[in-house]
Amino acid sequence: MQTFSYRLIDWQGKHGRHDLPWQLNRTPYRVWLSEVMLQQTQVASVIPYFERFVARFPDVSSLARATTEDVLALWSGLGYYSRARHLHRAAQMVVAQFGGEFPLNSQLLQQLPGVGASTAAAIASFCAGERAAIFDGNVQRVLSRHAGIVLYPETRLARAQLYALAENLLPQAEDMPIYSQAIMDLGATICTRNQPACHRCPVSDDCVARCENRVDILPGKKMRPVAAKVSVWLVRFQYQHRAWLERRPDRGIWGGMWCLPWLETEPDGNSLCQQKWGVPALRVSQGKPFTHLLTHRHLSITPLSIELAVPPQQEHEGWWAEENEWQQAGIPVPVRKICTADAQS
């Protein structure tokens, strides 16, 4: 255990990842952005989003000046949209309270919306060499196996024990950036959830899980709630090649994004059009249902397209969007799919 961190540091130099886009020109802004994007999302999925994001918003000041719509539009498809809203608010806070410069202290960083202890530790350790322990899922898995600590079913005692171990294993400050990258890389590429490559692991000699043949059962399986199945009708009202979009509530599925009207009971298209807009429907067509999977919901989505015969007579909060406008808006993937299919029909 005394050489744990230095075995990882040596391994990182020879076998770790060195060409991820956020590793190039490593600034607090880029580290923060990558860490937020990587929450609940794999590296391969994050890379194109990260590159588009920094091309549009190269620094925290430009992000702070952006509109929420612009931020959500770039985030569309990455999921967990509360991350994008927190990101935007945090950028504005960095500009307003810290003069546009990220504080490089992990405790101060945790004052920012959406920045927890592990994200704060990543920024502080990579950019300032602070001896702060990253504690994401990859790190927890590595340490749980190496020390033989059962983390799930999760208990406060097990988590506290594991976090104390993470802090005790930290190297000297000057080695923190390499070590932090090393332990994350080890979990992502070697000590993976399934089929870990123990024969290539630099700390396998004294790994409790390997020595006791417990690799497959550590850190233990977390009990996951059964995803609820929800039937949804997404209604595309159309008038003169424009689609009606409404803002989703900040909390819940697709929070804060532009969306087609969402119904959870099957509507009658003609009656719905008359009730909502005070005009008859020119044409009503129902699309083929499709499934969209979220972490805690399995959505069965039925598209319903309703073309208005005459201009709407009633006003609602929302937006009649031209095709070139909704294509640039922050809309969920299923909504984009429906609008695109209707535009091409």
Image (cartoon, rainbow, N blue to C red):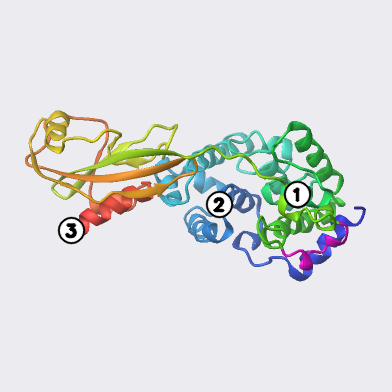
| Disc 1 packing (10 Å; few <14; some 14–19; many ≥20) | many
Quadrant location of the C terminus?
bottom left
Residue occupying the point 58% across, 50% down: 33
Cα–Cα gap, marks 3 and 1? 53 Å
Q: Earlier in the sequence, mark 2 or mark 3?
A: 2
Residue 127 visible somewhere in the drawing: no
Q: Earlier in the sequence, mark 1 or mark 2?
A: 2
| Residue 306 horizontal/vertical position (percent) | 16, 43
Region in magenta: 197-206
Q: In terms of depth relative to the viewer, which is nearer, 231 or 101?
A: 231
Q: Earlier in the sequence, mark 3 or mark 1?
A: 1
The mark total stands at 3
Image quarter for residue 265? top left
Asked if the residue at tag 1 contacts the one at tag 3, i.e. Cβ–Cβ closer than 8 Å, the answer is no
Question: Does 104 sit left or right of 230 as displayed?
Answer: right
Residue 70 visible somewhere in the drawing: yes
| Residue 257 horizontal/vertical position (percent) | 38, 40
Q: In terms of depth relative to the viewer, which is nearer, 306 or 14?
A: 306
As helix, strand or loop, the secondary structure at mark 3 comes to: loop
As helix, strand or loop, the secondary structure at mark 2 comes to: loop
Give the residue pinned by disc 2.
41
| Residue 42 horizontal/vertical position (percent) | 57, 56
Give the residue pinned by disc 3.
345
Question: Does 16 sit left or right of 226 as displayed?
Answer: right
Cα–Cα gap, marks 1 and 2? 22 Å
Residue 29 falls inside the magenta stretch: no
Cα–Cα gap, marks 2 and 3? 34 Å
Say which mark, if any, is on residue 125: 1
